[in-house]
Amino acid sequence: MNIYQEELLDHYENPSNYGTLPNPDISHEEDNPLCGDQIRIDLLVEDDKIKEVRFCGHGCTISLAAASMLTEEIEGKSLEEVKQLTKDDILDMIGIPLGPVRLKCALLALKVLKAGAYGIHSWPGEEDK
Amino acid sequence: MHTAHFRPLDVESIRKDFPIFATEPPLAFLDNAASTQTPRPVVAAMDAYYDTYRSNIHRGIYRISEEATEQYERAREKVAQLINAPRSRQIIFTRNTTESINLVAYSWGTANIREGDEIVLTVMEHHSNLVPWQLLAQRTGAVLRFLEITDEGLLDFTQLRDCLTEKTKLVAMGHVSNVLGTINPIQSVIEAAHAVGAKVVVDAAQSVPHFQVDVQQLDCDFLAFSGHKMCGPTGIGVLYGQLELLEEMPPFLGGGSMIRSVEREVSSYAELPAKFEAGTPSIAEAIGLGHAVDYITQANLAAIHVHEQELLKYAHQRLKEIEGITLYGPSAPHQKMGVISFNLEGIHPHDVAGVLDTHGVAIRAGHHCAQPLMERLDVIATARASFYLYNTMEDVDRLSEGLCRTQKLMTRRR
């Protein structure tokens, strides 16, 4: 399957939740040193639930589309639920197989989210390595 | 550069030596600045070692070990001839260019660089010719100075005189930029550096595979390159050094092979080149490199250079037709090698490379291990196409057509 399929391109061209929040409870930004992609995620948390989320940054189709999909997924969810998200959840959202290099693009947003919200700094899927 | 008479490359027959191009349509492999493909004769030479005389070198008192030693040392002679090194013991086998430069930084650098000394680099260096000097500067208190480039991507030569002073102990410079393809006026730099008593390290990873490099004509102090960018295998690289420098330098890695005699507390070291080749080296890879030298020499380096210049000219012409493309580096083909960095407006270079891949065209995208240069160009990354002896005009056509398709796909609704 072609990695440049409609759904990904839609998210890339019209990303959900793109932007920043004025007074976020959590705001975190990281880049992928391999390619320079950069993503920032802002969260507004109420009763341990993610009330609002925004992301911004620059990167390739895969990294920005994955970030867009991730923000749709986590809005309204509890912090505990979101903490359980894994590499495979992101791959399910994207729905196409990725090689090791593009995998990092896809996982950057989740990495930023987990580092900002839970202080987990490893790449998703590499927690035990 | 050689301009003697030569037969043009028979690209069609060369391509038959590379099974990777046997598919239909063939792979358009345009990432040669990163690593090149390996022809059958090189693989066959390594197979012959593994199949018929596999053994360690310099030790065994039996026939196949003697043959392995002979072939390993024969490879050293071929490399020495390729770059016109006066003696083959001036050729040190390493893993790659990076290890060669680190060898100089640790061994020569630690023995000769003091606090306040200056090391002159350029802003277009590959990280392999930057980070070892940063580490050396941190260890010794030396200062790094950088030569800038013009907007055309050429070395700012006027700045050289101000940069070179009696404080300058070392100049480390790429012969050809792996991003811009710029051919640096290395010979003039070496003359100017020697005039102030500085030594010069040449990162020749992007030059030795593509045209005749003569270390005696250049009069460089050290020169480093990799086997895997010149039709050879991975895991084998070369450091050339001036004889008196190599002889004075302390060892880099300690271990077997590099010693003369070992006592409990101290050892004395082997002569060159063994002093710098501790442990069992990459034997098959060195033999493979020797055959890669044969391969590109038989094809003829001057012919390779002309072929790449033709590809470059044609690629410039085709890519310039594309709206919204930015090409980086010198615009005159004679100032550069077969490397083209570019960006398509509004499209991340990863996506450019990703879409091209779906059309069987392999190019590089990223910072190309040259982040300070990316910053100077004010880009996050670029896409890069780079040529070698087996590339064709059709490869360039497929690149150009692929870029147009990328634009259509990625900017559908704008």
Image: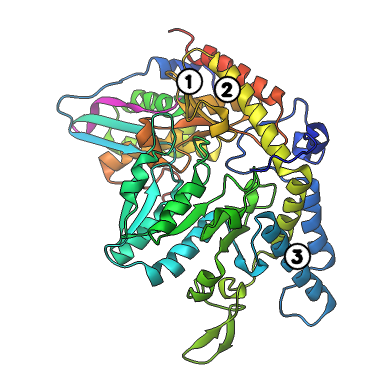
Instruction: State the CA–CA distance, disc 2 to disc 1.
Output: 32 Å
Q: Residue furthest front?
A: B195
Q: Percent position (x, y) of residue B132?
A: 42, 57
**On screen, residue B358 above or below B19:** above
- Mark 2, Cα crowd under 10 Å, few <14 / some 14-19 / many 20+, is some
Classify residue B302 as left or right of residue B250: right
Mark 2 falls on what kind of element?
Answer: helix
**Residue drawn at point x = 70 percent, y = 24 percent:** B393
- Image-quadrant location for residue A115: top left
Instruction: State the CA–CA distance, disc 3 to disc 1.
Output: 54 Å
For disc 1, the marked residue is: A8
For disc 3, the marked residue is: B74
Q: Do the numbered discs 3 and 1 sit on residues whose CB atoms are within 8 Å?
A: no
Q: Name the subunit of mark 3.
A: B
Q: Amino acid at mark 1?
A: Leu
Instruction: State the CA–CA distance, disc 3 to disc 2.
Output: 40 Å
The magenta segment: A46-60
Q: Amino acid at mark 2?
A: His
Q: Earlier in the sequence, mark 3 or mark 2?
A: 3
Nearer-the-camera pick, B250 or B166: B166
